[in-house]
Amino acid sequence: MKLEVLRFNSQDDFTNGLLFDVTDNVRSFLAYTLEDEARTTKVWGETRIPAGKYKLSLKQHGGFHNRYRNKYGSEWHKGMIYVNDVPQFEDILWHVGNTDEDTAGCLLVGQTSQENFIGSSVAAYKSIYPPIRDAILSEEEVWVEYIDFDGKMDQKKSKDTSPVVDSKEDVMNILSTEIKSLKSEIKGLRQAIILKGLQVK
């Protein structure tokens, strides 16, 4: 399994991004992401990890693991999604949260996004976790590439054969396509709710 985190907006306290599955060279949107800001010098708990390609595994110990196992049950939760071998960083996880206050270098996921806030984080986590968990448990290698397209960091093209985005224009095209798709899904959901006789605000 191959994943991408495309960072497109870095401000003083946070970074907005998009999580994609790019397995088999097909880009599929999974979730919005939120991280800490970019810094040239790391500040503990206030710095996003460097752009790069990292292997994911499941961390089956620690406070987050115990809390999530209690919350979601041991049959569903098999360990925290863990980003391995990050230079100068330890214990980088993917988890639930809404603002930069909920992350210390980790990646938060959500179904909605605005500056320094992602919403429906639990729903997003429940959506992305099972396929990643199952791939890791089946001993498939799972990799993620963090790519900076926010104008703050130098780009390094991937050496693999997955699609490479070369410019901010490409990012905007991806965003535009995903927004159109999401708008279509929302419209369909609203119509389905209306058909069921429920009021939509």
Image (spheres, rainbow, N blue to C red):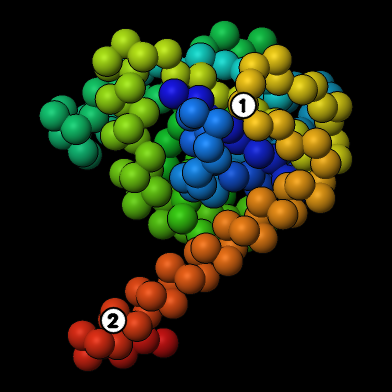
| Residue 124 screen position, x and y as percent | 39, 48
Q: In this view, does 140 lie to the left or right of 169?
A: left
Disc sitting over residue 193 in the figure:
2
10 Å neighbourhood of mark 1: few (<14), some, or many (≥20)? some
Q: Which of the 4 image quadrants contains residue 19?
A: top right
200 or 103, nearer to the observer:
200
- Tell me what residue is drawn at x 59 percent, y 45 percent: 18
The residue type indicated by label 2 comes to Ile
The residue type indicated by label 1 comes to Ser
Query: What secondary structure is marked by label 2?
Result: helix
Q: Which of the 4 image quadrants contains residue 129?
A: top left
Please say if 16 is above or below 62.
below
Q: In this view, does 130 lie to the left or right of 165?
A: left
10 Å neighbourhood of mark 2: few (<14), some, or many (≥20)? few
Looking at the rendered image, the disc whose residue lies closer to the viewer, 1 or 2, is 1
Number of numbered callouts drawn: 2
| Residue 99 screen position, x and y as percent | 56, 49
The reply to whether residue 156 is visible in this rendering is yes
Mark 1 or mark 2, earlier in chain: 1
| Residue 145 screen position, x and y as percent | 61, 25
Q: Name the residue under label 1.
A: 162
